[in-house]
Amino acid sequence: MAKLVKCRNCEYQVARTANNCVQCHIKNPGLTTTDHFINTLCFAALLLGLMLLYKISFNDQLIQIADVEAAGFEKQYQRQTLIENAEGGWVGQWKSERIELYQFTDTVAVDLEFFSKRAAPDNVNGWNDACIHKNIILLSEGHNACQTLKQL
């Protein structure tokens, strides 16, 4: 049998799990403010845990410029004027191609149209390819660097 408690509104004896009080018809009459507070804390902790789990799993997938260097990218100079939202940018050689490489923390905020225009056939910079892989955007004179980036 369910434990009886006082209704939080009229103090009539109701089951703790009752949906409505038979006396005053308030919803969830057996739940106290403390119960609501505990439920809210549990929900917030669960939400925070899921957010942290997502962040940890997402960060495992991020590529660092050091990872690209380990795969053979040779830095020549760092871009002083960065593309909006970029953490870092470098110009250098990779797979015998001149490239620009940009690292982002959030690729959702990246203006992909800007990068695709920079690799359009009529561009003045000489870029033939533009690609994005995870959190790295690459502009290249050829097509090998993008293929290699996608393997990281």
Image (cartoon, rainbow, N blue to C red):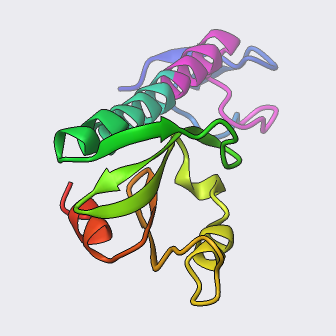
Q: Where's residue 46, x and y in %?
A: 44, 28
What are the residue bounds of the magenta stretch?
Answer: 22-44
- Say whether residue 87 is visible: yes
- Compared across the picture, whether 40 is left or right of 137 comes to right
- Quadrant (top left, top right, bottom left, bottom right) of the N terminus: top left
Q: Where's residue 54, x and y in %?
A: 39, 39
Q: Where's residue 37, x and y in %?
A: 63, 15
Q: Nearer the viewer, residue 125 or 32?
A: 125
Q: Is residue 101 above or below residue 24?
A: below
- Compared across the picture, whether 91 is left or right of 116 comes to left
Q: Nearer the viewer, residue 147 or 73?
A: 73
- Say whether residue 64 is visible: no
- Compared across the picture, whether 44 is left or right of 152 comes to right
> Which residue is at a point 44% across and 18% down the rendered structure image?
3
Q: Where's residue 23, x and y in %?
A: 77, 32
Q: Quadrant of residue 79?
A: top right
Q: Is residue 85 above or below residue 149?
A: above
> Which residue is at a point 41% across and 28% down the rendered structure image?
52
> Which residue is at a point 22% across and 61% down the rendered structure image?
95
Q: Quadrant of residue 134?
A: bottom left
Q: Nearer the viewer, residue 132 or 47?
A: 132
User: How many numbered marks appear?
Assistant: 0
Q: Is residue 87 above or below residue 44?
A: below
